[in-house]
Image (cartoon, helix red, strand yellow):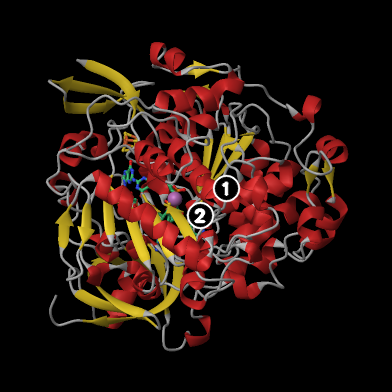
Amino acid sequence: MKINTVCRLCSACCPVDVDVENGRIISVQRIKRYSDEIYQICPKAQAVPEIIYSPRRLTRPILKTKKGLWQEVSWDTVFDFLTGKMKQVKKNYGPEAVCWLRGQASDWGGPWHYAMRLMHAFGSPNAIGNGSVCHAGREALQTFTYGDMTIPDYKNSRCIICWGRNDQDTNPSAYEDLLYARSRGAKLVVIDPVKTDLAAKADVWLQIKPGTDGFLAMAIMHWMIKHHLYDREFIKNWTVGFNRLKKEVEKYSPELVSSVIQIPTKKIIETVRLYIDNRLACIAEGNGLDMYSQVSQVTRALAILRAISGNLDRMGGDLIPQPAKIKNYQLRTSFFDKPLPVSEDYSLYSQYSEKRGIQVLGVLIDAILEHKPYPIKGLIVQGANPVVTMANVNRVKKALQQLDFLAVIDPMMTQTARFADIVLPASLSFEQTMISNHALSNNHIRLQKKIIEPWGESLPDWKIIFRMAQKLGFEKEFPWETVEEAIDDQLQPSGITVKDLMEQSEGILLEETRYQKYLQEGFKTPSRKVEIESSLLEKNGYSAIPNFWENIQYQQPSFQKEKNKYPFVGLSGRRPNYFVHSQFRHINSLKKKEKAPAVDIHPSDAKKQNINQDDWIMISTPNGSIKMRVRINPIIAPGTIRIAWGWGEWQEQYNLNLLTDDSVKDPITSATSNRVFQCQIKKLNHR
Ligand SMILES: Nc1nc2c(c(=O)[nH]1)N[C@H]1C(S)=C(S)[C@@H](COP(=O)(O)OP(=O)(O)OC[C@H]3O[C@@H](n4cnc5c(=O)[nH]c(N)nc54)[C@H](O)[C@@H]3O)O[C@H]1N2
Ligand SMILES: Nc1nc2c(c(=O)[nH]1)N[C@H]1C(S)=C(S)[C@@H](COP(=O)(O)OP(=O)(O)OC[C@H]3O[C@@H](n4cnc5c(=O)[nH]c(N)nc54)[C@H](O)[C@@H]3O)O[C@H]1N2
Ligand code: SF4
Ligand SMILES: [Mo]
């Protein structure tokens, strides 16, 4: 039987056809939307049966005994244990000492809304998502600038700028749209320190020095303003602060910026010309900008560039989304006074969105270890593997060991789960019905349908949360027996029901795409205009206009002071389309695509260091050391090495985040610079 649903093994959330026989998944294929030439096969989708029926899946809840051994227990025992621990911490330290940490796997959707609701009902404001290193930092700063995070309208675009984004590996549907636009003549600019396969196909590839993107955006605007290549009408009617921008960008001539970003002046100008001459154009920014401690100001510069070029909310440009109307499941209005969340130092960012909740990941470890601003004593981790994915892992491990309790909700036994007192086996994608934020953020809404029964005794995330709520006495806040009831309730303002979504598996279009919505509605900012100069940022003590020369400490790789001893720039590696972060290293068909985790080294550096292909080297920073196999590769610049990431789940000695730093954080979003750091390399005699 073929069933149409949405895959949620990664954040791309692709529509798929699934072959199911006798209640088992036989195969999964992404649905074809264009021609055979454009269609992208997903290796992870091909491996779904191997992932779902992996012997590494947890079939029953497990509890750590006093001797440190794992014991299988019943769900009743688990819920008694967990809620008992939560109540104990509440009694001793207050409800705010219990924190929920959400990773990327729960995809910002239903289960995350339920988790926030549960924590708020319990009395803790501390439900924290990992968005500060993912896309939420960019979303927040775009929101402060023009009220939302734009979506690049690839399909209709005449010029696409992929800025720190690589859809070819990370989002096959978006990549298909990009290829479609290319087939109709769209130009492509890729801004990336690495010559990725996508960069190799571009009309212009800017091999930027990591972390200096803000300077490039300012140089582009300098040139546009100097040569009057901007949208005067739009600026006059729909922006505030253009004159201040004009003055600021004077300091960023392409000639001056060229040496900072290591791109020739003429290439900067060529990029401006492509962007301006091929309208309408869009800027697709990505995670290549996120894990830097200056992500907020860089995002602001890019947002302003979109606005002054006149591409905002125009067909083929950068679209303001038309999200579904849903009920806000947070109960956080009761927290505006006390207790404040542990993220109080980042209060502006903590409240940037009514529905996203707190995404200030960077402060969690400080709260556990240094009780800053107060201690976190109990932690529930859902769909995350922080022992591999958070910066400065040695510090993360130390923190996990100091907790009164750690509960992990995950389908697999992970490196993080090993530190837990209790592990709750979650169902995977295809085993639980949910509505994801991916869907809720757009005008085309789809259901991720459950199509097979959960593995073993695993439970869907929603059910785990609902049962915890019942145990804690929050029946009033969680009156639903099934997830379908909860989804119907949340979607009620949009007038759509689960039944409608079941009947139309290809999804429901809430409304046709509308362009230039600001003409009727204005922008969702204090001035109703695009805030080139942000009053909100200024009021909160931040720079109202992006300024990169004066905040240079945030634009440099970590461990700058020790640069002499750590001369190489280490860049956190690619996200190949066969892995997701720390996941799938144990899935044979996917693992075998790489013989061992590799570090890319430029041929000239390899020669200087007397290093050969497939040698093993030690990579070190002041925080730790890891080992890796050498791949001599001209796709990176000399002096930079690109290090495979996510392998810490496979073996600890390959954990890239042993090297990274968590001490310097983006002043607005708390983003740590997991992406780039000074490091040294040493050849090893053995593996
Ligand atoms: N297969 C797969 N798909 C995924 C994921 C996965 O793990 N695997 N993860 C999902 C998640 S959670 C996310 S957030 C997205 C992210 O997906 P993308 O937004 O595409 O981000 P990345 O692939 O991490 O990085 C994009 C590019 O940024 C470049 N880059 C690095 N540093 C810089 C810099 O300083 N400046 C510029 N301009 N570029 C830089 C990198 O070399 C890389 O090629 O992917 C999602 N999709
Ligand atoms: N150095 C460095 N650090 C990074 C990054 C980087 O590129 N370099 N990327 C950053 C980014 S963008 C992100 S988003 C984070 C990702 O950080 P994490 O969210 O920690 O990433 P994953 O390793 O994908 O862990 C997800 C976990 O969820 C589990 N899981 C899968 N499906 C389900 C489900 O349905 N329910 C539940 N409960 N669990 C499920 C998986 O088994 C896995 O253990 O890492 C960040 N850290
Ligand atoms: S890209 Fe991600 S969501 Fe899409 S089919 Fe592959 S694993 Fe599933
Ligand atoms: Mo992410």
Q: Which mark is residue 357?
A: 1
Within-10-Å neighbours for mark 1: few <14, some 14–19, many 20+ = many
Query: What residue do we see at 48% from left, 35% from top?
Result: 478
Which quadrant, please, contains the N terminus? top left
* Residue 572: quarter of image: bottom left
Disc 2 or 1, which lies upstream in sequence? 2
Tag 2: amino acid: Ile
Query: Badges 2 and 1: C-beta atoms under 8 Å apart?
Result: yes
Relative to 675, 64 lies left or right:
left
In the displayed structure, 591 sits above or below 549; it is: above
Of the pair 187 and 646, the residue shown nearer to us? 646
In the displayed structure, 334 sits above or below 651; it is: above
Tag 1: amino acid: Gly
Query: What residue do we see at 46% from left, 76% from top?
Result: 369
Query: What residue do we see at 28% from left, 38% from top?
Result: 459
Residue 89 in sight here: yes
Q: Position of residue 219 (x, y in %)?
A: 69, 58
Callout 2: SS: strand
Q: How many marks?
A: 2
Relative to 527, 416 lies left or right:
left
Q: Position of residue 648 (x, y in %)?
A: 27, 64
* Residue 32: quarter of image: top left
Q: Which mark is residue 128?
A: 2
